[in-house]
Amino acid sequence: MILLSLFKYFVGNTAMNSKIHKLHNQIDKAIAYLTPFLPLANCHMVEFFTDSHWDNLLPRKLRDYLDDCDFNNAVEMFWSSAEGNYMDHNELSKWVQETRSYCLSVDNEYCLSADELQERIKSWGADMVPEVQISEFMNSKKSYEVQVMSRAVASLCAASGATHCVEAGGGRGPLLLALSLAYRLPSLTIDCDPRTLASAHKRVTLVQKQWHAIAKRIKNGTAERIAEAIDTDLHRFAQSYITNDTDLLQIVREKFPEHSNDDMKLLLTGLHTCGNLGPTSLRLFACSGHISALLNVPCCYHLLTEDVDEMAFDVFQRDYGDGKWGMGFPMSERLRGYNLGRNARMLAAQSIDRVVRHRQLPDRSLLYRAVLQVIIKKHLPNLPVTEGRLKGISSKCQNFNDYFKMADAILKLGLYESLPENYLTDIHKNMDVQWKRIVLFYFVRLCLAQVIESVILLDRLLYLCQNGFEKCYLVKLFDPVISPRCHSVVAVR
């Protein structure tokens, strides 16, 4: 028996060390590639012309190639390359292919597909429960996410022995509503916003009343009506701001007093946990023995905190955080001291999959705002401009002339009427060239988005491995076109 235990320990330790070693290699390669391009990732598109981004931030060979390209041909080449068609070995195709090589890919080792997660859950002794589809009270994106994720969470609860499910930052609680009504799991949604929770209570009551009309169970690809009675008392809410010191078990006991004497095991989940809430969830899982499993889908990377922007907290962090968050990035020892930057983290939330699938060019406002910045810098160099004041005005404009006139009025520049008549005429002459450059620059920069997101996610997985968790994975849970933040962090104690 002792020899068998020692053998299992040795095999497990060897497997863990191998996994950590491979994560180190993957992260090191991604960082080595990404670091020289962080100025490109962190630039402001507003300053595209004033700071000469085209000349200063693009690799020289790529820039020269794009300058010689016809605009429409370059755009088509980007679509084709981004879809994996690398027939033309030109500089743009090489850039797309190279950036893609540093992104996460399903490898059946530490990054799993949704189907491979199902196989892992079965190997841990649980069956996969059927999906449940809810057709009302959610948009199509949220409905899809809840359908896929609620099944995974319910099955993971069974595999980990969890008795209660807790959702961090659940907002209106659609995920746990499905878990409580469809899978009969005692579920607690925790959110810090009282107005959101008040709205959630009303929404839950409406869904419960309509449940049998709007919910279907999916079996073998067929949607079946759910006939069995539901328990409307299994989904509850708590108002709390979650930090590294939050006692989730105590909150669950308070909200489920009838279970307070039971041996509780929690599954901690979160569908698009915003900013530092994702890392905090991982830290709570790592240090709390009563949390038996974790399934977390992150979001809003720009709201993560790093050493470079420690004071740039959002309003909730300023009001409630009180220094108890810890850094949002990095989490692992391997990347201690490494910084991405806020704009790079914001870029990580952009979806190249969706852009390519829908053939989306950037909004014309990128060009208009950058040209406006040139005018402001030239004529009012000391004027501070708050970006939010111009948000959305381009949709009301037919051309740059309209945009300039409206922006001039909003910002009280006094330039539109005072500049010479031929001033805008000269600007319009260069618009086609400027549009070509800003679109292609946008596409080149967009290719870095998934590299940055991969570094953030791999850092979180490595943190769990370094804390001794063998059953931890990144899982590509969603279709990235429907739900761009498609990866989840899954761990079982």
Image: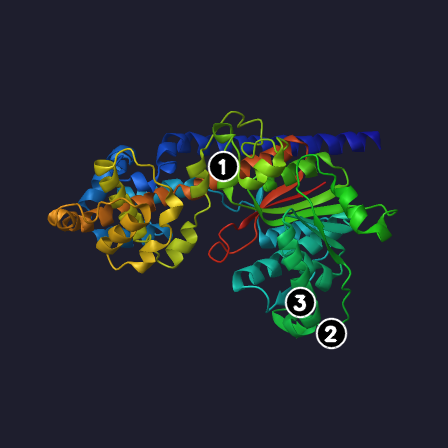
State the image coordinates of residue 221 (x, y, percent, origin top left).
60, 69
Rendered residue at 62%/67% (across/down): 134
Residue 489, relative to residue 73: is it above or below?
above
Single out the residue that lies furthest toward the left.
422
As measured in the structure, the alpha-carbon distance from the residue carrying label 2 to the one carrying label 1 is 45 Å
| Residue kind at label 1, given as amino acid type | Val
Q: How is the image coloured?
A: rainbow
Mark toward the start of the polypeptide (2 vs 3): 3
Mark toward the start of the polypeptide (2 vs 1): 2
Residue 252, relative to residue 468: is it above or below?
below
Q: Secondary structure at mark 2?
A: loop
The quarter of the picture where residue 249 lies is top right
As measured in the structure, the alpha-carbon distance from the residue carrying label 2 to the one carrying label 3 is 15 Å
* Closer to the camera in the image, 212 or 253: 253
Q: Secondary structure at mark 3?
A: helix
As measured in the structure, the alpha-carbon distance from the residue carrying label 1 to the one carrying label 3 is 39 Å
State the image coordinates of residue 358 (x, y, percent, origin top left).
38, 59
* Closer to the camera in the image, 6 or 57: 57
Q: Quadrant of the N terminus?
A: top right
Q: Which residue is mark 3?
A: 207
Q: Which residue is mark 1?
A: 455
